[in-house]
Image (tube, grey):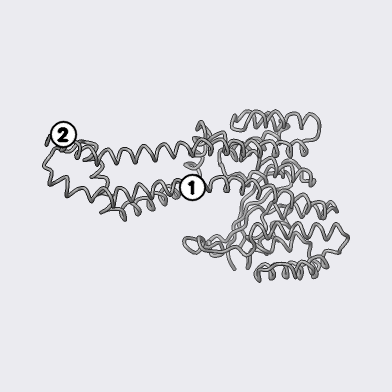
């Protein structure tokens, strides 16, 4: 027996937490479902199943995001073509190139053939299919529209993956440029500049301040580069540990949203993610309160997640979602106005998808503008720093030449 903690959503949309002393995670999930709740998160209290430290860092997922997307698209296509579920899974069993992915599909097929619903089979694969994924499939099963549910789910996964990839691809060139800038400066300061130090000592002239500072930095980097790397590593670890505290993370995320350039970008990215998740869930027939409780878990910014929690409480008492989100002043005004229109027209699900499309484009355009400005700024900064180093080397030489004349 092991102790498993859990978070779940009740039929009223409330998030509840608790624990079960059971044999396995699947048994804990069954108990949660038997109580009429939707499981959001189940984990061993001792952390035995989740892994930690280096083990968690190097743990490889059994199915990648791309493989999950392909599985969803292919299954939706086969079901839409009239194939029975177990037959469709049997066909998909031959498609994955990864042996681990093939074994996962095989276990899902065996679960379905034993009489279990697809949602239960997916839920038995922890770490592969998210709670959002499982809950949408469960809603599709209840509504008798599993093929269309999987189609919407595949579209959701594809758009989320596309947004993430567009941001990552846009950052590749600036990242390479930053690395090259620091590498060039490191070589200049640790290899080139120290070679002039013996010559400056033999000149017996007073060195300019800029030269002294440059020589000091070069010597420091040359002798203590390893200590600086350790300091950076420990600094990152300390920040991560500090942000593990929910209160400190909330304070940091709130401050992040208030930053002039980064804040609006984070708000747009998170709004697009939340809106697409909510829209997909609502289109699938999931009640608004349950959808809000599930969708808030896709947010990476805890301040925005807190605003969604407060909005959920307001909606329970009869308040409007747009008004509640607008009171936090953390979400873009355009988003709350569009939500208000969706509530008034009774088409909140459709409006959520439009909000997601709008802010996907807004976020991409913001990233493109930031990167367009970043490249010339980095180039100018690199040129300026190289000019300072060259000036530090040349000034003592020019000073000596003038004194000789």
Q: Is residue 127 left or right of residue 351?
A: left
The image quadrant of residue 6 is: bottom right
Residue 289's disc is none
Residue 148 higher or lower than 60, as above or below: above
Image x and y of residue 215, in percent: 23, 45
Within 10 Å of disc 1 (Cα), the crowding (few <14, some 14-19, many 20+) is few
Nearer to us of marks 2 and 1 is 2
Residue at the right extreme of this rendering? 82
Query: How far apart are the two marked residues, 2 and 1, measured between alpha carbons?
Result: 43 Å
Residue 307 higher or lower than 76, as above or below: above
Q: Nearer the viewer, residue 25 or 331?
A: 331
Q: Is residue 289 left or right of residue 237?
A: right
Residue 307 higher or lower than 34, as above or below: above
User: Which residue matches tag 2?
Assistant: 402
Image x and y of residue 320, in percent: 72, 31
Image x and y of residue 48, in percent: 53, 65
User: Which residue matches tag 1?
Assistant: 175
Image x and y of residue 158, in percent: 70, 50
The image quadrant of residue 403 is: top left
Q: Secondary structure at mark 1?
A: helix
Residue at the front extreme of this rendering? 405
Within 10 Å of disc 2 (Cα), the crowding (few <14, some 14-19, many 20+) is few
Q: Nearer the viewer, residue 344 or 19?
A: 344
Q: Secondary structure at mark 2?
A: helix
Locate the N terminus by quadrant: bottom right
């Amino acid at each position: 027996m092991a102790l498993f903690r859990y978070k779940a959503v009740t039929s009223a949309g409330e998030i509840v937490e608790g624990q079960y002393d059971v044999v396995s995670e699947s048994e804990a999930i069954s108990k949660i479902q038997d109580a009429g709740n939707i499981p959001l998160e189940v984990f061993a209290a001792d952390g035995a199943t989740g892994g930690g430290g280096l083990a968690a860092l190097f743990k490889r997922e059994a199915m990648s995001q791309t493989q999950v997307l392909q599985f969803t698209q292919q299954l939706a296509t086969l079901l839409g073509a009239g194939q029975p579920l177990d037959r469709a899974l049997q066909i998909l069993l031959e498609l994955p190139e990864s042996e681990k992915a093939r074994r996962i599909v095989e276990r899902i097929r065996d679960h379905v053939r034993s009489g279990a619903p697809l949602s239960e089979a997916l839920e038995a694969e922890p770490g592969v299919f998210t709670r959002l994924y499982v809950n949408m499939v469960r809603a599709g099963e209840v509504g008798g529209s599993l093929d269309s549910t999987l189609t919407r789910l595949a579209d959701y996964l594809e758009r989320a993956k596309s947004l993430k990839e567009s941001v990552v691809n846009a950052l590749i060139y600036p990242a390479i440029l930053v690395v090259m800038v620091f590498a060039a400066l490191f070589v200049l300061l640790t290899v080139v500049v120290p070679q002039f130090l013996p010559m400056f000592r033999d000149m017996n002239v007073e060195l300019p301040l800029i030269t002294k500072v440059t020589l000091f930095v070069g010597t420091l980097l040359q002798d203590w580069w390893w200590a600086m790397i350790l300091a950076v590593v420990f600094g990152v670890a300390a920040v991560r540990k500090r942000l593990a505290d929910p209160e400190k993370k909330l304070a940091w995320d709130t401050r992040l949203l208030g930053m002039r350039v980064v804040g609006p970008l984070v708000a747009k990215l998170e709004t697009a993610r939340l809106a697409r998740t909510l829209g997909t869930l609502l289109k699938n027939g999931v009640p608004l309160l349950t959808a809000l409780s599930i969708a808030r878990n896709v947010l990476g910014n805890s301040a925005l997640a807190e605003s969604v929690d407060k909005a959920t409480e307001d909606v329970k008492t009869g308040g409007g979602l747009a008004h509640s989100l607008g009171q936090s002043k953390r979400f873009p005004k355009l988003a709350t106005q569009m939500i208000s229109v969706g509530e008034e027209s009774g088409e909140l699900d459709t409006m959520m998808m439009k909000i997601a499309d709008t802010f996907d484009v807004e976020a991409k355009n913001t990233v493109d503008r930031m990167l367009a400005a970043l490249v010339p700024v980095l180039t100018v900064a690199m040129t300026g720093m190289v000019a300072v180093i060259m000036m530090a080397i040349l000034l003592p030489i020019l000073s000596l030449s003038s004194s000789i004349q």
